[in-house]
Amino acid sequence: MTTPRIGWYGLGSMGLPMATNLQRYLSNTQQPSLTYYNRTISSGDALQELGAIPATSLPDLVTKCDVIFTMLANDKVLTESIQSITASNNTSLSHKTFIDCSTVHPGTTERVSKTLSGLGATFLSAPVFGGPAIAATGQLVFAIGGPRPGSEDIKRYIEGVMGRRVIECGVEARNAALLKIGGNIITLNLMEAVGEAQVFAERTGLGTGAMEELIAESFGGVAGGYSKRLTSGIYAPPLNTRPGFGISLAIKDAEHALSLATEAQVQLPGLEIAHNNMRASRDYAGECLDSSSMYGKLRIGAGLPFWNETSRQG
């Protein structure tokens, strides 16, 4: 049996560390090197140093590979990428497997799945839980939805490589996208709660140090990590840096959840507050903000400046 060739498209703040771990696994197990492509191809220079091979275009990547992972910014980029692939007359998709790790609307997942399956390919939705730091350590949690044979085959590239756990979501790809959006409801509500607690601690004179210790000890490492984003100033990083989980991506995720909730007649009051605070923070301070920057809006509401002592100052 021929060893499948693995491809990767999308080398942003999540895609690059994930692809790096995958290339290391392929190299260590003496499998063919990862083939990659990115719109800014220089983003893959570090991958190339590890032995990965750049493709000349997205259709070129798909032509050369049997299994193609994608990790893209939003629904528009994913849709346009699939259109680019299907428009190429020289690219046969028969028997190829696509695994999309992006966070997109379940409707987008359904449309992409239908398009690719109609051309003989298998499509799996495999969004992830965890930020860039977790991706770098290979400890992400994956949700997988799609045809079972394809799902089982690709787990060897995920568990113990890019992730620590796979949550099965059934044969419908859209269910994995739904789980990811449901998880983001928890994530954004937790960020909002941590921000509120830290503003309360600062304004009452308690101090953020004691509050951060309580958050980490009582509510776990995830909540503690969100607190550190605030106290370390990462919520508003320097303008020449890339936020870990950008504000516009978080707003997009919140809007997907809110639209689905409206369709299902479900109220999400906590998420509505977090969404409004994120939008207000972006209006005030621009795009170079982490998703946790709703904290800045909370600070303003308490009579404090948007910026704290460790963040950028404008």
Image (spheres, helix red, strand yellow):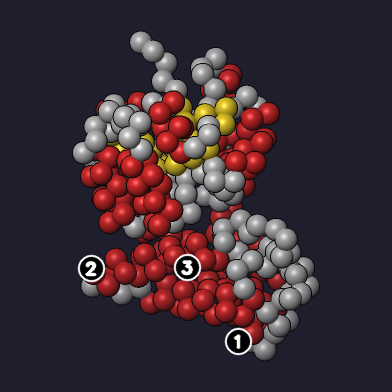
Name the disc covering residue 51, or none. Answer: none
Name the disc covering residue 251, or none. Answer: 3
Q: Residue at x 31, y 74 (%)?
A: 267
Counting other residues with Cα less than 10 Å from the Cα at mark 2, is it few (<14), some (14-19), or many (20 or more)? few
Residue 167, x across and y down, in percent: 36, 41
Residue 99, x across and y down, in percent: 38, 38
Q: Residue at x 48, y 54 (%)?
A: 73
The answer to whether residue 103 of the structure is visible from this angle is: no
Quarter assignment of residue 156: top left
Residue 115, x across and y down, in percent: 25, 44
Is disc 2 placed on a helix, strand or loop?
loop
In this view, 249 is above or below 103: below
The amino acid sitting under disc 3 is Ile
Real-space Cα separation, disc 2 to disc 1, in angstroms: 32 Å
Location of the C terminus by quadrant is bottom right
The residue pinned by badge 2 equals 264
Real-space Cα separation, disc 3 to disc 2, in angstroms: 20 Å
Location of the N terminus by quadrant is top left
Residue 290, x across and y down, in percent: 60, 64
First-in-chain label (3 vs 2): 3
The residue pinned by badge 1 equals 301
Q: Which of these two is toward me, 105 or 291?
A: 105
In this view, 309 is above or below 62: below
Most distant residue in the front direction: 89
Number of labelled discs? 3
The amino acid sitting under disc 2 is Ala
